[in-house]
Image: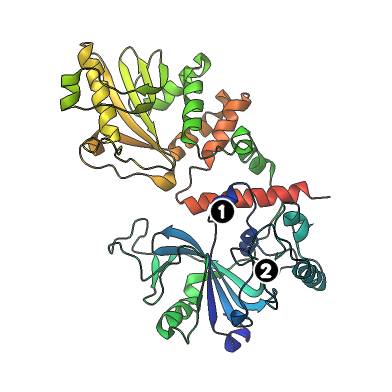
Amino acid sequence: MIGKNYIEKDGIIINRMYAGDYLDSNIGHEVINLFAADNGCHYLYLNATGNFAEEHKDRINWMVLVKRHCSGIDEIVGLAGGLFDVYVPDKQFNNKYDDIDKDIFEAQKAYCKKEGGVTYGGVGIFDVFGKAGQQSIFITYKAEMLFVPKDKRLFICYANYSGDNVIPGITAKDVIIRLNGYKQANMSLKQYIYSTDNCADHNALVRHFKDNSLWKESYDKAHAPSISDLKKNEVSLFDICNIQNDENCFSNALAYFMNRPEYHGLWKAFFQQYHILLNNLSVTREESAVISDANYNKKHPGGGRIDLLIRDDSNMIVVENKIKSDINDIESDVEGKQLERYYNYVNWLLYDTNAKSKVNTSFFVLTPNYNIPKLSGEMANIYRIITYKDLYVFLEKNLSRFENDANFVALFNAIYRHTFGNVCDYLYHEMKSKFFRQIKDNKH
């Protein structure tokens, strides 16, 4: 698959992408790794700051592009082969994003000029990234070829994977490359593998690299976003205020639009999917689930605050919104679990008002597709999961009902980022959107 450069070098570098809070407000340089430049060439950026130590100079032939799947396992999203060093480690480099080394920066500019200019979507790499206030290294390597998985997903399972043989999110048809001599790095975003260090692990990787049935060449190029892309990724207050992952902000917004009379019909239709027939509805945010009856509370403890409590004459619906946190016990309440306390509270309300036979109760956990919690015990039979994708697909089908409401559209667009099945997938989506937008904004 790879040309003569393969014979001369045997180094492999694993480059972990889409990691860290830095990406919340910046374009990660690694976005170029999966796109060919306008000249058809493949340029690579090595995380975290683009540099490498002198001991690795002219030794790396392969770059494996990975994203974190879980502790001890990475998923391979791309493979670059036939690497040539662009960055030259001939001086001490300060590993900080905002420290600009003039000599290195000028060397990068000279290299790009020698290449005839490195552009993406007609915009030079320095214009795409330089105005974002990032560092002096823009390109670490040039690659002969770039591959992406063909039909099967590929994973690297490291020596420190502590789970059982049934790995969550991995199916029997997926390919797992097991490394017995390397642990998944926790702090660094890059790992080096040489045949002289661990021949067995090195050979296991190369054997899979050279299996043509696993790979297809990628020539994807960056471009300015389409009108539909721009609408889907339109900058809103969620982005400006950096609250795209804030559970409280999403819950506040959902409660607001559920309480608006003009949208009651929309939400009635949504819950009808779950066989719940609502009449006039109202929503309470963060209702205290404290049970004032001491005797009842002793047997069925309450407590905490319910994210969304939806009521009408014949229904009570609990919605617990979980974006990045888990369904955990409260530290001060070892005996009871969060969801169970809410369940107990609602049943106490109905018991206390003698309305239990007249009111239907429903319990849900609203969760991103990349962070679906495992419900256990009795609550697994009581609570149902609503994913953000479920919500997004429903709203997308009913877009005409709110498309003229800019605030509702902003919520709708913000929900989209939580529809991906893997947290790294949405980080890549966010990064690509920012990349394409920068291209558009700098297009002359």
Place residue 94 in its image quadrant.
bottom right
Q: Dot 1: what SS? A: helix
Q: Which one is in front, 43 or 218?
A: 43
**Image position of 420 with respect to 270: above or below:** below
Q: Residues within 10 Å of mark 1 (few under 14, many from 20)?
A: some
**Image position of 6 with respect to 357: above or below:** below
Q: In the rendering, at what x and y percent does residue 359 appear?
A: 26, 16
Q: Which one is in front, 169 or 14?
A: 14
**Image position of 360 with respect to 147: above or below:** above
In the image, what residue type sits under mark 1? Tyr
Distance between mark 1 and mark 2 Cα atoms? 17 Å
In the image, what residue type sits under mark 2? Tyr
**Which disc is residue 428 wearing?**
1
Outermost residue, right side: 444
**Image position of 261 with respect to 255: above or below:** above
Q: Dot 2: what SS? A: strand
Q: In the rendering, at what x and y percent does residue 242 appear?
A: 59, 39
- The answer to whether one can see residue 124 in this image is no
Tell me, yes or no, whether the two marked residues, 1 and 2, touch with CB atoms within 8 Å.
Answer: no
The residue positioned 30% from the left and 14% from the top of the image is 314
The first of marks 1 and 2 along the sequence is 2
The residue positioned 72% from the left and 53% from the top of the image is 133
Task: Please identify the quadrant where the N terminus is shown.
Answer: bottom right
Place residue 186 in its image quadrant.
bottom left
Q: Which one is in front, 369 or 59?
A: 59
Residue denoted by label 2:
43
